[in-house]
Amino acid sequence: MLPRLFSLSNITATTRLHGYRAFSSKVAPKNYAFAFDIDGVLIKGKRTIPEAKRAIRMLNGDNAHGRHVPFVLLTNGGGVTEQAKAEQISNMLDVEISPDQVILSHSPMQALVEQYKNKNVLVVGGKDRECFHVAKKYGFNHVFIPDDIHHWQASVWPFRHPSRDSISPDAASLDFSKIPFGAVMVFHDSRDWGRDIQIMLDAICAENGVVGTQKGDCKVQEVPVYFSNTDIIWSTEFPVPRLAQGSFKMALENVYHTLTGTNLQSTSYGKPYPTTYAYAERVIERINDGKKPSRIYAVGDNPAADIKGANNYGWTSVLVRTGVFQEPGNSPHFPAHSVCQHVEEAVEWVLQQEEDKEKKA
Ligand SMILES: [Mg+2]
């Protein structure tokens, strides 16, 4: 299920959206569009990459040809609502980004609502109860987080107490011996790998998904598992890349295989998976006045996610050196169509390509 999107042509320059001035009106739909990764391309942790401000301004018409070019932000990040991410990036880049331009790793997981709307879902990852609220906003009616289970029985993970900030308003009435889980969904990075792997295994290996019970035969997995991204590493202000959700997935899979002798079955979203690109293309079409652009330029810093995914989906990939990838030349494993120093250079390169195409046409 897609979030409600608006048409650019319906928005006036004076419209204010979520505290930010929305797009200027009368932006003609384009035959090409951009999909920017966020971390390592536009920002690094809490720091803005300086060229990013100029790059986005260029797409908003501040270029030699006065062109407005549609773009979305396509990130394997998440843990907040699309609206919260749009506000964060708008503030950091000092430009207007609409929530409808933001595709988070878990945005395409809204398609799972139809299947799990009225089932009990264990949502893992993120700060405090933020992913609980994201899942509720998407339409999942019965959402629980590992902290809820930890509050119910401290002995689930006896090495620490859960954070007070994450206590559910219904904590006193929750009895997980009566709550069978229908699915486990990882929305964002776990803040406590050991505790969360334990609780996920409790749900996956349980009889009928009831935590505190154990199936005799683990060969048939009854509780499906979903991951919102499988990046092994990501880029922050720290000089060396950090472990990401894909590493957490590997840890869970290893423990599961060691304990049960079988491979954990799961479904993954985010880049480089085609489900995410199909979702992104529908979003781009909506913000481009219902017209599907012929070319989509993906700008990213992670060859294994941004470049591999874009290449496989038939987009044009541009690799930048401001994040995970910092080597000379192109990526040996997932070569991009073009490699640029930073996002501003990438935008300039694409605009020039497109101007040349237009001249020739
Ligand atoms: Mg990145």
Image (cartoon, helix red, strand yellow):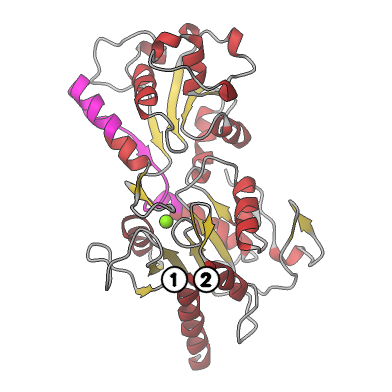
Residues at marks 1 and 2, CA–CA distance in whole angstroms? 7 Å
Q: Is mark 2 within 8 Å of ligand 1?
A: no
Q: Quadrant of the N terminus?
A: top right
View extreme (right): residue:
14
Query: Does 15 sit above or below residue 252?
Result: below
x and y percent of residue 274 in the render?
39, 52
User: What amino acid is found at the position of numbered circle 2 in the picture?
Assistant: Glu
Who's the residue at 79% across and 67% down the image? 13
Query: Does 346 sit above or below residue 79?
Result: below
Question: Badge 1: few (under 14), some or many (20 or more) residues near its Cα, within 10 Å?
Answer: many
| Residue 239, quarter of picture | bottom left
Picture disc at residue 51: 2
x and y percent of residue 339 in the render?
35, 73
Front position in the image: 184 or 125: 125
Magenta region, residue range: 251-276
Query: Does 216 sit above or below residue 43?
Result: above
Q: Is residue 270 magenta?
A: yes
x and y percent of residue 231 in the render?
35, 47
Dividing the image into four equal quarters, which quarter contains ligand 1?
A: bottom left
User: What amino acid is found at the position of numbered circle 1 in the picture?
Assistant: His
Who's the residue at 48% across and 92% down the image? 360
Who's the residue at 36% across and 8% down the image? 213
Who's the residue at 34% across and 25% down the image? 194
Q: Secondary structure at mark 1?
A: loop
In the picture, measured across the screen, residue 126 lies left or right of residue 6, that is: left
x and y percent of residue 262 in the render?
20, 26
In the picture, measured across the screen, residue 290 lies left or right of residue 272, that is: right
Q: Earlier in the sequence, mark 1 or mark 2?
A: 2
| Residue 227, quarter of picture | top left
- In the rendered structure, are the residues bearing label 1 and label 2 in contact, judged by CB atoms less than 8 Å apart? yes
Query: Which residue bears the numbered disc 1?
Result: 342
